């Protein structure tokens, strides 16, 4: 190693020296000694790597403490203010639970529960029984199963249905228009391969007809997979086959409906419609338009749900008690007819624009008084449902628009506020869309900007 690098490495302060420095003491005061020490060690490791890579980082006790502070402030998941206008923001945790759902999870977390205990018989019960009666009542399905997420439920459904009948190379038919990728690398062809099924593609990207499915059927065909394209739309010269029509072919139709809408939202397929149309299984997420915890839910025919429950993958993908408690409480709101008031996701989707204009006006007024250096105005904005749902669905909204400062710099300062505030930059200004603000967020935004 070159002498320069070696000298730089030697000049790095010891952990204790940083801890004794006022900057280190501030850090320990805010995050605790143990966390501060661990973060300082990690920061020093980072600096060592930079030096070895030939970058000449700044070296001082303060610089190390500052790097450690950045590491600690990024820990989480912790609260942030979503001012992006994207309601189901996947990077910001997707759906926000209702108070009732959060309390149910809290109780399940801090108490014992009947997770796998049958209170009537006093014997061992099954975690798979929770939420099933509610799901049946809400969707009209014969049976239901909750696992960790929708990707897992789709994988398990395919694996179970394919495995239930022995065949050399079981096939599943999918339209080429539905061979999609959902965010995070969930690709339908790859999930199919993992499940042990052979993919039989039919039709074209823009047009698939019933006859295409029909001519692909053979003695190895086990099922038809119907996928809601979720995060993209084809327009123009298009044709696709609905679930009801597919069932006329006499094969089980596995429908990955995605967002789990139970109420009508901008043309998203509803779960109960897939069940009514005869899907063998309808599969959806718990934390998209359903507005509950992260979960993957399958509803449908008793035979296939039992096959899923018995499959070894079910254990690997099982939902935990916090999820099950929150999901039950979320589903209860639908059954009681209070979902639109109780669930933040549905509430945010439906807040009338004039109410948002008023909210934005209120924030802008406070900012004009508190932060005179900023140019503040209220502008019409477009919010989105997000989370891979309704890609072209535009929800009229309002934003507080901030100018008079470099937008990237202002955005960065708001991200380092406590709680961090996340907006979006457009037309050279920082936009804070108020549709996605939750109770208490208005004050947090005003405070963050006052300190910026
Ligand atoms: C979102 C989505 C998934 C993945 O759901 P997760 O709950 O994130 O695993 C799978 N299929 C479709 C059609 C989706 O829209």
Image (cartoon, rainbow, N blue to C red):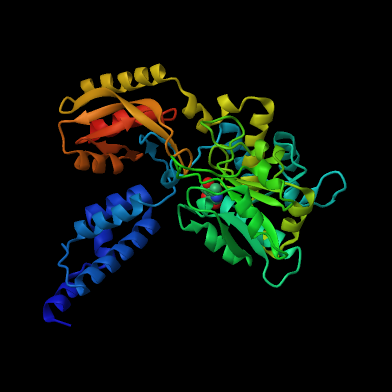
Q: Residue at x 72, y 49 (%)?
A: 115
Q: Is residue 138 left or right of residue 362?
A: right
Q: Is residue 31 left or right of residue 157?
A: left
Front residue of this view, candidates 438 and 51: 438
Front residue of this view, candidates 180 and 403: 180
Image coordinates for residue 328, horizontal then vertical, percent:
67, 39
Residue most extreme to the right: 121
The answer to whether 36 is drawn above or below residue 242 in the figure is below
Q: Is residue 180 left or right of residue 320?
A: left
The answer to whether 48 is drawn above or below residue 265 in the figure is below
Q: Is residue 421 visible?
A: yes
Q: Is residue 318 visible?
A: no
Viewport quadrant of the C terminus: top left
Residue most extreme to the left: 4
Front residue of this view, candidates 111 and 291: 291
Q: Residue at x 67, y 62 (%)?
A: 159
Q: Kindly indicate the quadrant of the structure image that contains residue 402.
A: top left
Image coordinates for residue 105, horizontal then vertical, percent:
61, 42
The count of marks equals 0
Image coordinates for residue 391, horizontal then vertical, percent:
43, 39
Image coordinates for residue 106, horizontal then vertical, percent:
60, 41
Q: Residue at x 14, y 81 (%)?
A: 2
Q: Is residue 322 left or right of residue 121?
A: left
The answer to whether 279 is drawn above or below residue 357 in the figure is below
Viewport quadrant of the N terminus: bottom left
């Amino acid at each position: 190693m070159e002498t320069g690098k070696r000298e730089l490495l030697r000049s790095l302060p010891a952990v204790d020296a940083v801890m004794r420095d006022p900057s280190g003491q501030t850090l320990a005061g805010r995050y605790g000694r143990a966390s501060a020490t661990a973060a300082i060690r990690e920061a020093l490791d980072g600096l060592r790597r930079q030096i070895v890579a030939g970058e000449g980082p700044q070296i001082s006790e303060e610089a190390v403490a500052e790097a450690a502070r950045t590491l600690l402030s990024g820990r989480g998941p912790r609260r942030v203010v979503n001012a992006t206008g994207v309601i189901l923001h996947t990077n910001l945790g997707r759906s926000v639970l209702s108070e009732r759902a959060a309390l149910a999870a809290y109780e399940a977390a801090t108490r014992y529960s009947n997770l796998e205990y049958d209170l009537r018989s006093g014997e061992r019960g099954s975690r798979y029984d929770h939420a099933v009666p509610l799901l049946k009542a809400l969707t009209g399905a014969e049976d239901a199963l909750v696992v960790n997420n929708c990707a897992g439920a789709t994988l398990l459904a395919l694996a179970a249905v394919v495995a239930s009948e022995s065949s050399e190379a079981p096939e599943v038919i999918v339209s080429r228009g539905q061979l999609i990728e959902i965010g995070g690398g969930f690709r339908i062809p790859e999930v199919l391969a993992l499940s042990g099924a052979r993919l039989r593609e039919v039709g074209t990207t823009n047009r698939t007809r019933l006859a295409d499915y029909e001519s692909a059927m053979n003695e190895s065909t086990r099922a038809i997979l119907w996928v809601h394209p979720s995060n993209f739309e084809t327009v123009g010269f298009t044709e696709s086959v609905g679930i009801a029509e597919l069932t006329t072919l006499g094969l089980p139709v596995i429908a990955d409906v995605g967002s789990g809408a139970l109420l009508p939202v901008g043309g998203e397929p509803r779960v109960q419609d897939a069940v009514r149309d005869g899907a063998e299984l309808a599969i959806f997420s718990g934390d998209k338009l359903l507005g509950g915890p992260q979960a993957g839910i399958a509803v449908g025919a008793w035979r296939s749900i039992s096959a899923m429950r018995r499959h070894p993958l079910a254990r690997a993908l099982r939902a935990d008690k916090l999820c099950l408690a929150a999901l039950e409480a979320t589903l209860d709101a639908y059954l009681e007819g209070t979902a639109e008031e109780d669930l933040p996701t549905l509430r945010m989707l439906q807040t009338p624009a004039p109410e948002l204009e008023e909210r934005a006006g209120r924030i802008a007024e406070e900012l004009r008084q508190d932060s005179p250096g900023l140019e503040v105005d209220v502008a019409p904005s477009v919010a989105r449902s997000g989370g891979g749902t309704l890609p072209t669905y535009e929800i009229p909204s309002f934003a507080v628009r901030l100018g008079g400062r470099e937008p990237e710099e202002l955005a960065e300062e708001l991200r380092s506020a406590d709680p961090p505030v996340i907006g979006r930059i457009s037309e050279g200004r920082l936009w804070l869309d108020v549709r996605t603000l939750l109770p208490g967020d208005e004050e947090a935004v005003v405070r963050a900007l006052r300190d910026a």
